[in-house]
Image (cartoon, coloured by chain):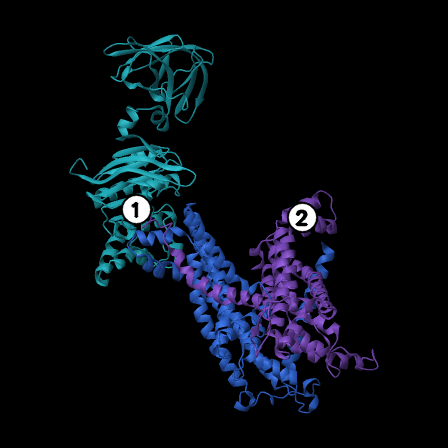
Chain colours: A purple, B cyan, C blue
């Protein structure tokens, strides 16, 4: 009876290869590191029992806990700065003439598609003691000696915001573009000033984009270890750097796994929160 | 599978979805070469029926027979049935020629022959020079003809058309109705046609299957359906009908007396009518006449004129009966006599133009 | 609103300048005439010296480039098949609420979530997870592990673009093909596939760029003998000696720019065609 009903033909079987691949490589891999986080280190990259909470106990120690807090704070400030800088940008982009808009979109997307490393490298050049920024400031007489810009928290923050900005601009832009402008006009018509109209109409209506942007800039920030590596040097120990260290230098896979598990839980928490306040995962994929 | 010239038959067709029953037991015989229309309001199940015949959906119960063979389990590509879809479903990435040739290509017909057949079909639908165009470059009427050509070229035993003229404007629709009918006779293919437009159905069909809530209400020729409706639904769905509801008070051989709120009306009798039965008398508004007096021997009522409207060559006059019911009469304005609202007049009609049907509880008054 | 209109272009320009500043710096310094120790940070005169011999074998850049290309091409090919079929299979959820149907729906949902996971979580987690899994499976770290992990994060991009395109495709087209005598496979190949091809291509281009640019995941599943272009850039930057890195980066930027332009052209052409088709369908209904 079910044979030829086009609505029910078993096309779903086509999804199986893709699904099985994901289950195997992504699902199993993640479950595996979850399991590893409860074990102790072994030879090379292996682990050995018995099951223990040692790794997590270690994480609770002041050293690691402080690193976690610093990483979270940095990710948080990154997301916020991205919002402050990116929202007006997206706003004006959405309000521009169609031709300008296409060009702007292209200009925003290009860096997004190019290698993050290259762009961070550019900042390294810019920030270095003999680099363009210092040279310009020196030659203009604004400073007497070169500023220490590289290998500072400041450099890392700038790099983070820089790397994450497209992830704020794009969802916010798509949200603003889909907005019904007649609402703003209606509020102006009813006597609101441009600023008031912006606060009371535009911002709430573009909230989905804002939330998506915040999530998209917050989550990756915690794991961008190469950024803090290049711009922050060995001084900066963010969560991502810790993971890297434990793996490469100490070769402690289970401990690195536990660090990852914490990060995964954090990510899950953020996504859960996002869904709770009404965010849809479709918004995140512009 | 009673007669020799039965092309397709439906037996006990049922279809239910999670939340509703779309088809509630359909039985139908379709004869070779006929133009059969499935007519009914939206949601009555006509499209579902069509899709089941085409093989695009499977029934929950029942069978479909084509030339005596049970095709219920056959996938659509294996049935000698083709469909003209409601929004044409022309392949946007193929030219008109390629669209029309598609079915022949699927049958692995040699290229040279395909070219010949496509050319002939383009001529038939009067799109001779449009072969290389894309569907996006055609008008609505032209796309419609391509859709028909694409299906008809395969010479199916049965062609199904799902409200093909729905998207066209009135004038074009009328034109296409004539052309479609001509094409059907020319090609000799059996058509099953869907529409909710009763005028269209009356114009084109050999037979009409009136549907409601997944059931066939009446299966008849257009004339039969119009002149002899068997239900209030049939009477009101097609044309405009006045319904007088009452009870059969006296039943004689050739006459029934219908008691409506105290007034007694003589009607033509039918064998299924028993005394006390609740009935509706159906009188088409164009068959209802009025005047100061009725010619001798006609059924009549006295009523008060309440409204009179001019509608371009036609007049609609509304009357209020002493029983509280109202009736509408339509006639041409040529040689008419005008009466003021409030005038009491005689309403009369020819007894053989009025039909008695069971009273279904006043749903269609 | 008048106030805003002066502010707007200024602000946009400012942010754009900041966004492109590092890129410009990298490109500029690749033309540095200075060949002293300060060449990486002090600019003096134009020269193409760093481009000469950029791809000579001893630098190792050409090897890295070839490896990256191989991996990207292989990964994108496999993921486009997986992702396209995956999207096609997700078309319609079964209407019946039988237990089997609901289990089927749940499985499909799980498949979708798992597939999308790589782009929702920080890459570093995925990198570690792959490292752990591959070492447990005793797989040799190198091109094999790189390809396996790249496929895993490329599939979602193609899946999303194809699924989105499929949702706008009129189901009647497939039905018409079947009605006219095409088997399910032939209907897919002659009607559905040509119409979703632009989406497959644009998704593949995106996935290609993601694979070529990937650093974090490749960092963890790499082997001693192999290196990809981004990894090579990283090690060069860490050592930080000559602007030949800049030259390399400039070339990479140029290629990325070309790919983006290509992608936009294709999607613009597809969008124009689709707008016409949609208008046609809307007219007919």
Quadrant of the frame with the C terminus of chain C: top left
Q: Nearer the viewer, residue B255 or C230?
A: C230
The answer to whether C231 appears left or right of C158 in the picture is: right
Q: Is residue B203 left or right of residue A255?
A: left
Q: Quadrant of the N terminus of chain C?
A: bottom right
Q: Residues within 10 Å of mark 1 (few under 14, many from 20)?
A: many
- Specify the subunit that label 2 lies on: A
Residue B35 placement (x, y as % from top left):
25, 38
As drawn, the label of residue A184 is 2
Q: Is residue B187 above or below residue A159?
A: above
SS category of the residue bearing label 2? helix
Furthest residue in direction front, as rendered: A50
Residue B305 numbered tag: none
Q: Are marks 1 and 2 on the same chain?
A: no
State the residue at coordinates (25%, 9%): B252
In which image quadrant can residue B193 be found? top left
Judge depth for marks 1 and 2 and give the one in front: 1
Residue named by callout 1? B54
Residue A19 in the figure: left or right of residue C174: right
Mark 2 closeness class: few <14, some 14–19, many ≥20 residues within 10 Å: many
Residue C226, image x and y in percent? 52, 82
Residue in the foreground of this view, choosing between B308 and B86:
B86
Disc 1 to disc 2, C-alpha distance: 51 Å
Of residues B334 and C135, the one drawn nearer to the viewer in this rendering? C135
Image spot of residue C121 (x, y percent): 59, 64
| Residue at mark 1: chain | B
Q: Residue furthest left?
A: B4
Q: Closer to the camera, A280 or B60?
A: B60
Residue at x-position 57% and y-position 71%: C127
Q: Quadrant of residue A143?
A: bottom right
| Residue B186 visible in the shown view | yes
């Amino acid at each position: 009876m079910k044979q030829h009903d086009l609505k029910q033909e078993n096309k779903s079987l086509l999804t199986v290869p893709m699904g099985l691949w994901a289950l195997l490589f992504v699902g199993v891999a993640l479950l595996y590191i979850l399991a590893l986080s409860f074990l102790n280190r072994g030879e090379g990259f292996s682990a050995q029992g018995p099951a223990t909470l040692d790794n997590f106990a270690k994480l609770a120690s002041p050293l690691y806990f402080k690193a976690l807090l610093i990483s979270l704070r940095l990710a948080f400030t990154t997301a916020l700065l991205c919002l402050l800088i990116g929202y007006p940008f997206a706003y004006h982009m959405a309000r521009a003439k169609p031709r300008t808009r296409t060009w702007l979109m292209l200009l925003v997307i290009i860096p997004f598609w190019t290698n993050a490393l290259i762009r961070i490298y550019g900042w390294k050049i810019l920030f270095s003691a003999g680099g363009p920024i210092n040279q310009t400031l020196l030659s203009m007489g604004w400073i007497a000696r070169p500023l220490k810009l590289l290998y500072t928290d400041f450099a890392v923050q700038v790099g983070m915001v820089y790397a994450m900005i497209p992830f704020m601009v794009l969802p916010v832009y798509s949200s603003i573009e889909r907005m019904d402008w007649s609402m703003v006009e209606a509020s102006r018509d009813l006597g609101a000033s441009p600023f008031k109209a912006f606060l009371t109409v535009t911002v709430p209506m573009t909230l989905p984009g804002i939330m998506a942007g915040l999530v998209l800039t917050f989550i990756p920030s915690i794991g961008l270890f190469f950024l803090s590596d290049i711009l922050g040097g060995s001084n900066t120990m963010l969560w991502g750097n810790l993971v890297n260290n434990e793996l490469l230098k100490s070769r402690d896979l289970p401990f690195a796994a536990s660090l990852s598990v914490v990060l995964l839980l954090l990510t899950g928490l953020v996504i859960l929160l996002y869904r709770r306040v009404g965010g849809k995962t479709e918004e995140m994929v512009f | 599978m009673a007669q020799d010239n039965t092309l397709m038959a439906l037996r006990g067709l049922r279809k239910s979805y999670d939340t509703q029953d779309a088809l509630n037991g359909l039985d139908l015989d379709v004869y070779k070469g006929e133009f059969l229309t499935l007519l009914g309001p939206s949601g009555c199940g006509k499209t579902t029926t069509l899709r089941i015949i085409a093989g695009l959906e499977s029934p929950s119960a029942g069978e479909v027979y084509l030339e005596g063979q049970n095709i219920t389990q056959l996938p659509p590509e294996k049935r000698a049935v083709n469909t003209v879809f409601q929004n044409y479903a022309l392949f946007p990435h193929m030219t008109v020629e390629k669209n029309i040739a598609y079915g022949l290509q699927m049958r692995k017909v040699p290229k040279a022959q395909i070219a010949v057949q496509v050319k002939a079909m383009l001529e038939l639908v009067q799109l001779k020079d449009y072969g290389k165009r894309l569907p996006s470059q055609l008008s609505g009427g032209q796309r419609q003809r391509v859709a028909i050509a694409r299906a008809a070229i395969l010479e199916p035993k049965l062609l199904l058309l799902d409200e093909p003229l729905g998207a066209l404007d009135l004038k074009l629709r009328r034109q296409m109705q004539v052309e479609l009918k001509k094409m059907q006779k020319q090609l000799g293919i059996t058509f099953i046609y869907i529409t909710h437009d009763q005028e269209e159905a009356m114009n084109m069909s050999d037979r009409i299957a009136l549907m409601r809530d997944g059931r066939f209400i009446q299966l008849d020729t257009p004339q039969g359906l119009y002149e002899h409706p068997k239900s209030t639904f049939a009477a009101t769905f097609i044309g405009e009908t006045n319904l007088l509801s009452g009870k059969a008070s006296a039943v004689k051989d050739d006459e029934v007396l219908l008691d409506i709120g105290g007034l007694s009306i003589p009607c033509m009798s039918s064998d299924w009518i028993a005394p006390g039965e609740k009935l509706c008398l159906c009188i088409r508004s164009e068959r209802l006449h009025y005047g100061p007096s009725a010619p001798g021997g006609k059924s009549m009522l006295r009523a008060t004129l309440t409204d009179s409207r001019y509608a371009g060559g036609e007049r609609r006059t509304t009357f209020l009966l002493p029983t509280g019911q109202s009736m509408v009469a339509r006639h041409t304005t040529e040689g008419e006599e005008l009466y003021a609202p409030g005038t009491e007049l005689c309403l009369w009609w020819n007894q053989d133009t009025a039909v008695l049907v069971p009273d279904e509880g006043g749903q269609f008054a | 609103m008048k106030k805003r209109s002066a502010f707007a272009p200024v602000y946009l320009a400012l942010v754009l300048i900041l966004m492109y500043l590092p890129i410009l710096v990298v490109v500029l310094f690749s033309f540095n005439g200075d060949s002293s120790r300060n060449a990486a940070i002090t600019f003096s005169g134009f020269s193409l010296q760093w481009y000469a011999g950029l791809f000579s074998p001893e630098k190792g850049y050409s090897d890295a480039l070839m490896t990256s290309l191989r991996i990207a091409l292989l990964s994108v090919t496999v993921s486009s098949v997986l992702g396209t079929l995956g999207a096609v299979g997700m078309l319609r959820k079964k209407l019946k609420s039988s237990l089997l149907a609901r289990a089927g729906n749940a499985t499909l949902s799980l498949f979708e979530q798992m597939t999308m996971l790589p782009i929702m979580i920080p890459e570093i987690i995925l990198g570690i997870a792959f490292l752990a899994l591959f070492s447990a499976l005793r797989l040799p770290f190198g091109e094999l592990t790189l390809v396996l992990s790249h496929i895993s994060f490329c599939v979602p991009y193609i899946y999303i673009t194809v699924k989105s395109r499929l949702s706008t495709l009129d189901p009647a087209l497939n039905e018409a093909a079947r009605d006219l005598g095409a088997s399910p496979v032939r209907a897919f190949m002659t009607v559905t596939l040509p119409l979703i091809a632009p989406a497959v291509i644009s998704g593949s281009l995106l996935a290609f760029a993601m694979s070529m640019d990937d650093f974090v995941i490749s960092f963890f599943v790499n082997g001693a003998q192999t290196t990809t272009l981004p990894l090579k850039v990283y090690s060069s930057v860490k050592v930080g000696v000559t602007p030949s890195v800049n030259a390399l980066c400039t070339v990479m930027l140029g290629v990325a720019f070309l790919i983006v332009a290509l992608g936009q052209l294709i999607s613009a052409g597809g969008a124009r065609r689709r707008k016409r088709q949609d208008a046609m369908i809307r007219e007919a209904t």
